[in-house]
Amino acid sequence: MSNLDRQAALSVCGGRGFVVAEPVRELLSPRHVRLGESTEVRRLLPNLGRRMVGAWAFVDHYGPDDIADEPGMQVPPHPHMGLQTVSWLHEGEVLHRDSLGSLRTIRPRELGLMTSGRAISHSEESPRPHARFLHGAQLWVALPEAHRHVEPHFQHHTDLPTVTAPGLTATLILGELDGAASPGTVYTPIVGADLALTAGAGARLPIDPDFEYAVLSMSGRAEVDGVPVLPGSMLYLGCGRTELPLRADTDAGLMLLGGEPFEEEIVMWWNFIGRSQEDIAQARADWATGDRFGTVHGYDGPPLPAPELPATPLKPRGRVR
């Protein structure tokens, strides 16, 4: 998914110096962003108080939206560099096209994983016709230096492993959890899991104390380590935990995001992740005038133009904690 913010700011993210090395409970509030004519997203990362969770660098939650009489998601062709995009749905479908020629319809609890590497472009749209409701999350994973220029590729996995306990089903999106491993390609130690809890359930999910974690609430009423987390909000948990207590008042959907703290500082702007302002400026110029990002064929409309880069130089960010 694209960052459609026409006032996109350059930001420095990552670095172990900004990681909370102990268990915490920081509730992150979303920023509301329009995405096309009929979709509004709640942006949880990057957040004023928290830029990354492991290699997870961008998290949007949207829906459930009634799009029966609306076009639904309509994101024109746009570029990506230095990251992976993760498409995850609870309701609806998203049609993915990219400059490699991929054409896939992603459905609920199927993994759409696009690795941009050095450069790729893609579009996302609700099919015609489409289901009445659209509900999901779009996420980015930052690629480490050793792999950020990898050849771009797209994966679509429809059969993902699960971990179960009474009242809990955890579907592995990326990485490993409690002995199960996702087939999605990863480049850093990471985990992403969809947690489905039944009303009244209580569970203790085993997790890695060397990872930092956050939990995004998708639906229902649940508590994470005793903290109520409402849909569209995210609880940052820090590091140092060996298990995560979960409890649901109603049927509830959560997403567990975690990973080894990302060592490198990155520069993120619009739909690019680089290591310097010069990286970003070159990518913007290449999208505007060159063929580095390829062409998306079949989308009914022009590609997105890049916004203007900020006139002021990038400033290093201060510590979060």
Image (spheres, rainbow, N blue to C red):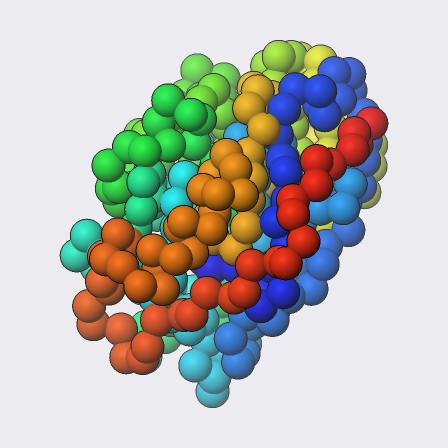
Find residue 26 and report its horizontal and vertical position in percent.
81, 35
Find residue 111 and report its horizontal and vertical position in percent.
36, 44
* Residue 66, placed above or below residue 284: below
Say left or right for 238 vs 282. Answer: right
Say left or right for 186 vs 100. Answer: right
Which residue extends farthest bottom? Answer: 69
Q: Residue at image x 17%, y 57%?
A: 101
Frontmost residue, 29 versus 49: 49
Frontmost residue, 216 versus 82: 82
Quadrant including the N terminus = bottom left
Frontmost residue, 321 versus 71: 321
Frontmost residue, 185 versus 153: 153
Q: Residue at image x 77%, y 16%?
A: 22
Find residue 131 and report its horizontal and vertical position in percent.
40, 73
Say left or right for 296 vs 275. Answer: left
Q: Residue at image x 73%, y 36%?
A: 317
Q: Is residue 232 visible in the rendered structure shown here?
A: no
Which residue extends farthest left? Answer: 101
Q: Quadrant of residue 239?
A: top right
